Image: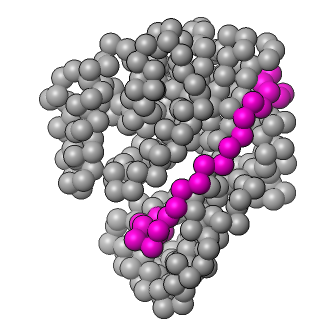
Amino acid sequence: MACEEQNFFDKFWKPYLEFEANLGFGLAQIREEIRFLDLQPGERVANIGINWGHSLQYILEACPDVAGVVGIDSSQKMMELARTVFSENDFYLNEWLVGLAPKARKYLTNLHEVAKANADKVSFHFAPAESINSFETQFDKIAATMGYHWLNDPKEDSFVSMNKSLRLGGQVVFSTASAFFECERGNYSFTLNPYYQSFFSVLERLYSSSVIGGKELRDKELDSEEKKTGKFTLDGVVKTIQRAGFNLEHYHEHKMHINTEQIDTYCIAGVKFRYDSDGGDKVMKQLVDETLKIAKSRFIYDHHPQQYEICPIFRIKKVKEV
């Protein structure tokens, strides 16, 4: 959710959307987060990290009588796409559908058909999480969907901003990815499956020696405490939110099975998180195809128990002003 010169979602919105349309991984996670927010009629809600607007729609489905929803994102592309999805005018969606895979076109069109009825209930603000208090709007609850690992460092700044935007007693729900977090059930994470790990170790070797070599792994800066382990910890997250005036109310690890038919799609999707490529250009596609063949010759995915996305979900409560 950081405002950068080249926002990740500005660049990779299309393959990211197609990945969701194929597997629905993020949608299941977002539904679970919003369920734990326990929305009530009359509440004013902010949604930080709106992507193409599905989380906004889920909020309105969970509680149609909320006083209103404000969608906040630092990706210009996602902001424009979500606005279009919630627009009552069908015409503007067409330009977003060009070049999308058929399943993704249907997915986006179907979302628009239900979301446009809620056009008058949603407003939008383009900003990073650490600046939302500048709107001078008081919220009852905030859904920072799938947000922790995308926050700018120091992450405490974003939670301070949320604190200033919430009434006393207000709540925030957020999650992170198991790849960046020390989960209690982390031993079951599909990212530890020998097949998945083999895919990326082979791809790294092939990529480094290719014509597009010079590996450019995404440098996700971590807070000093997390630099020691390379992953966020529950204790570290709790310390961060407490410094920002919150207490942890609930922690839950949502478990989703990644089956044999899905794992290759997850491997390919992971390419865009590690390299300056969406996996679709000709050279990278050849490398990925070759890597999959090598990984399949070495390991069989379902022969190992690590087959789950473990999604850490947090609900926190504002207990003091900061």
The N terminus is located in which quarter?
A: top right
When asked about the image quadrant of residue 180, the answer is bottom right
Q: Please identify the quadrant where the C terminus is shown.
A: top right
Q: Can residue 121 be seen in this snapshot?
A: yes
Residue range (magenta)? 242-267
Residue 3 in view: no
Q: Residue at x 42, y 67 (%)?
A: 262
Image coordinates of residue 164 in percent, x first then y, are 70, 14
Question: Horizontal and vertical percent for residue 34?
Answer: 53, 32
Asked whether, in this view, residue 257 is left or right of residue 253, the answer is left
Question: Height in image: 271 above or below 7?
Answer: below
Q: Which of 100 and 209 is in front in this view?
A: 100
Residue 244 within the segment the image draws in magenta? yes
**316 lies above or below 168:** below
Spot the residue most to the bottom. 297
The stretch drawn in magenta includes residue 249: yes
Q: In this view, does 179 lie above or below 222?
A: below
Nearer to the camera, 309 or 202: 309
- Residue 178: name its quadrant: bottom right
User: In screen coordinates, is 243 left or right of 90?
Assistant: right
Q: Residue at x 50, y 12 (%)?
A: 41
**Residue 293 at x, y = what percent?**
43, 86
10 or 299, nearer to the observer: 299
